[in-house]
Amino acid sequence: MTAQLENRIMMALIGVGFVSNFAVSFIGWLFPPLSYPQMTCWQIADSMAVMASVLMTRYAGSRSQNIAAAGFTMLAIAYGISFGSSNMNAINVEKMAMVVLPLVPATFLISFCRLFPLWLRYGSLLIVVPFFFMYKHVIEGTYAHDDLANAFAYMGLQILGLLWFVFALKDYRRQQMTSNNS
């Protein structure tokens, strides 16, 4: 396999990962709360996000965005914590709330990525706010599965994944056009 083909496959898999994370999470939301189908969808979605984040690590590093690459590695860890907080029909909310701990440095490091426009780089930092509310509710014992902070936290992170992919894909296509014109 040539490096060019491998890079094309990598970009496709990043897209599949982030799009699947968003779509399968939405499908899971349609099922009854904490049901087997919902939890299965959310575990699949987290797995796809881990894959996409790890591949984004590779892509960002190949574009000399090494600080951001480290951030995508930490993002994969955060999604792994989310995955590990789910059972067949329940969520361990204490584990789930711990997602915020690696998410803060992950989004900080990702904000260094020069492949993304400034609004996305700085906007990425805001995603930790609803996660802090979720964390606070767990600590205070006021956590509720249907809390709006949960929806904003995860939906916001999934939308960020889609945006990161769009701008990485734009960079990849620009790079391909430049190499084809050389």
Image (cartoon, helix red, strand yellow):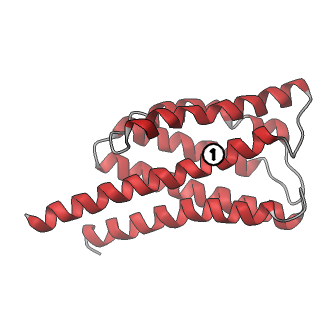
The image quadrant of residue 21 is: bottom right
Q: Is residue 160 left or right of residue 45?
A: left
| Residue depicted at 85% across the width and 25% down the height | 139
Q: Nearer the viewer, residue 142 or 81?
A: 142
Circle 1: residue type:
Gly
Where does label 1 land, which residue?
156
Bin the neighbour count of mark 1 within 10 Å (Cα to Cα): few under 14, some 14-19, many 20 and up: some
Q: Nearer the viewer, residue 5 or 126?
A: 126
Whole-percent x and y of residue 136? Answer: 80, 26
Badge 1 element:
helix
| Residue depicted at 63% across the width and 42% down the height | 78
Q: Is residue 22 left or right of residue 181?
A: right
The image quadrant of residue 181 is: bottom left
Whole-percent x and y of residue 89? Answer: 90, 58
Q: Quadrant of the C terminus?
A: bottom left
Q: Is residue 73 left or right of residue 7?
A: right
Farthest bottom residue in view: 1
Q: Quadrant of the N terminus?
A: bottom left
Whole-percent x and y of residue 107? Answer: 52, 35
| Residue depicted at 45% across the width and 56% down the height | 165
Q: Nearer the viewer, residue 15 or 118?
A: 118
Q: Nearer the viewer, residue 170 or 103?
A: 170
